[in-house]
Amino acid sequence: MTALDLTLVSAFLVGFIGSTHCIGMCGGIVGALTLGAKRDAAGSLWSMLPYLIAYNLGRVTTYAGAGAVFGFIGAQVFQAAPLPQAQLAARLISGGFMVALGFYLTGWWSGLAALERIGGKIWRRIEPLGRRLLPVNHSAKAFLIGLLWGWLPCGMVYAALAWSLSAGGGANGAALMAAFGLGTMPMLFVLGAAARGLGEFVRRPLVRRVAGIVVLLLGAYTLFASDHSAAHMHHSVGAG
């Protein structure tokens, strides 16, 4: 498995584990959109599936587009530095934001909420566009709403975007954010299907805390690898 493969798997897992946060942030949106969508004559939840797929594909498309931009910017910045230092800086950024996300998910530190407040100013300009697409009566509208929904201010998404800075290019940044977005989809699909019991379960502080600790440990591992790389680099220079 290549380094990129490991990164994409990690991004998916971070999205999946961290999606406990999505309950509070996006759960109400999913519920409202699902209720507003057209059902079949029997009112079957299966008739909602095309809408749920379209919502989430739109959201993941926005994430991937933003990841491409951040990945490209990061690659241009890191190319200006020598390769070992650039790799170390990339790992430090990745690990640092994963640790921050872990603390954020556990509720032990709310620093990423400041980014959400900044993003909220942008969201206030975008959100009215979504109202024009209501009611949702076909999948194309659902996809467009999903594209807008991807701009909802979310500290978890911002941490993943910071991670994409170190992806190594626009295509890798897009892939990282797409993997992250796909990781969040199972929980939001369940919410869209009105699985209230699971929604209540993942809202429990203990569940969110465990999820946050897992993400925190992934970040700590990345930082440890950075320290090990730095020590190895220093030893190699000294030996030379």
Image (tube, rainbow, N blue to C red):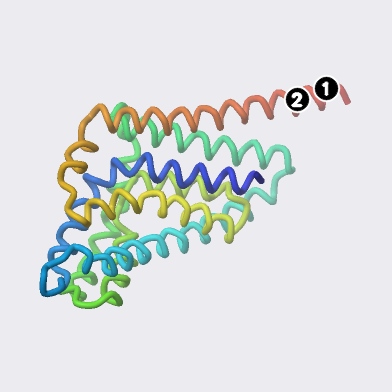
Q: In the figure, is residue 86 to the left or right of 186?
A: right
Q: Nearer the viewer, residue 128 or 199?
A: 199
> Which residue is at a point 52% across and 45% down the rendered structure image?
9
Near mark 2 (Cα within 10 A), the count class, few <14, some 14-19 or many ≥20, is: few
Left or right of 158? Residue 48 is left
Relative depth, front residue between 100 and 64? 64
Q: Position of residue 190 (x, y in %)?
A: 25, 51
Question: Mark 1 is on which residue type?
Answer: Gly
Q: Residue at x 38, y 27 (%)?
A: 213
Q: Is the C terminus in the top left, top right, bottom left or bottom right quadrant? A: top right
Residue 124 in the image: above or below residue 40: above
**SS assignment at label 2:** helix
Circle 1 crowding by C-alpha within 10 Å: few under 14, some 14–19, many from 20? few
> In the image, which disc is placed on residue 222?
none
- Side of 162 relative to 7 (left or right): left
Write the residue at 24% across / 48% down: 25
Image quadrant where residue 144 sits? bottom left
| On screen, residue 98 above or below 185 | above
Q: Position of residue 171 (x, y in %)?
A: 58, 61
Q: Mark 1 highlights which residue? A: 238
Q: Amino acid at mark 2?
A: His
Count of numbered tags: 2
Q: Which residue is mark 2?
A: 234
Position of residue 157 measured from the top left corner of the image (x, y, whole percent): 38, 49
Q: Secondary structure at mark 1?
A: helix
Q: Position of residue 95 (x, y in %)?
A: 52, 35
Residue 136 is drawn in which quadrant? Answer: bottom left
Q: Residue furthest right?
A: 240
The quadrant of the image that shows the N terminus is: top right
In the figure, is residue 185 to the left or right of 162?
left
In 3D space, how far apart are the residues under numbered discs 2 and 1 (Cα atoms)? 6 Å
Q: Is residue 207 above or below residue 176?
A: above
